[in-house]
Amino acid sequence: TSILLLHGPNLSQLGARDPAQYGTDTLEDVVAVSRAEAEAAGARLEAEQFEAEGALVSRVHAARTDGTGAVLINAGALTHYSIALRDALDLLEVPVVEVHLSNVHAREPFRQHSVIAAVCDGSIVGFGTAGYPLAVRAALALHDRHVA
Ligand code: DQA
């Protein structure tokens, strides 16, 4: 199985960005723990980060035909307002797991709603970097159910 791990705007700045919310791990660290979990389960993981909404939308489109078996996405702030991203994710037939480092439900009101949640299979939020291996496991479990 090939897992595609997508990150949205500002997640390139992890490590420097409000450590009280996001911890001190870098995006590279987050990708490394995710890949380790995937590889331990016999899967592969490809990771990409986008600052721009359109580029992220295009990458989601490409995932329909490039052999991607499951998608993990931390869309950053796009989570809260990008109907374009939502519509793109809705086109995917493979499992999609939403991830957030911080507990968005305990933060500002504008972070408490996700416009993509309803087109994802489930969400893992609030566990920092530790949420990513959980999301990998969830995606692989959904994938196996999907193809079984
Ligand atoms: C985030 C939460 C979003 O509200 C924020 O805009 C981010 C990071 C998280 O992982 O906790 O960029 O997605």
Image (cartoon, grey):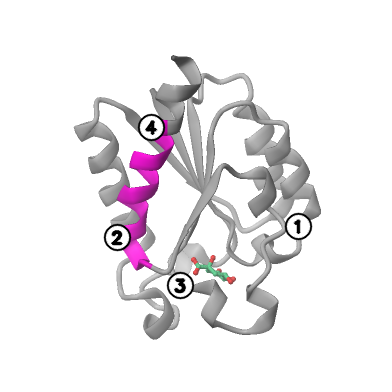
Quadrant where the image shows the N terminus = top left
* Few, some or many residues within 10 Å of mark 2 (<14, 14–19, 20+): some
Asked if residue 11 is positioned above or below residue 63 in the image, the reply reads below
| 101 to 54, vertically: above or below | below
Q: Earlier in the sequence, mark 2 or mark 4?
A: 2
Left or right, 53 with respect to 100, comes to: right
- In this figure, which residue is indicated by the disc labeled 4? 140
Name the quarter showing ligand 1: bottom right
Q: Give the residue number, with chain letter if any, for mark 3.
A: 102
Residue under label 2: 130
Q: Position of residue 104 (x, y in %)?
A: 54, 73
In front here: 96 or 57? 96
Secondary element at image label 2: helix
* Magenta span: chief secondary structure: helix
| Residue 119, above or below 67 | below
Sequence-first disc among 3 and 1: 1
Please tell me which of labels 2 and 1 falls first in the chain.
1
Looking at the rendering, in which quadrant would you find the C terminus? Answer: top left
Mark 3 lies within 8 Å of ligand 1 (Cβ measured)? yes
Residue 27 lies, in percent from the top left, at: 38, 59
Asked if labels 1 and 2 touch by Cβ distance under 8 angstroms, the answer is: no
Which portion, as a residue range, is magenta?
127-141
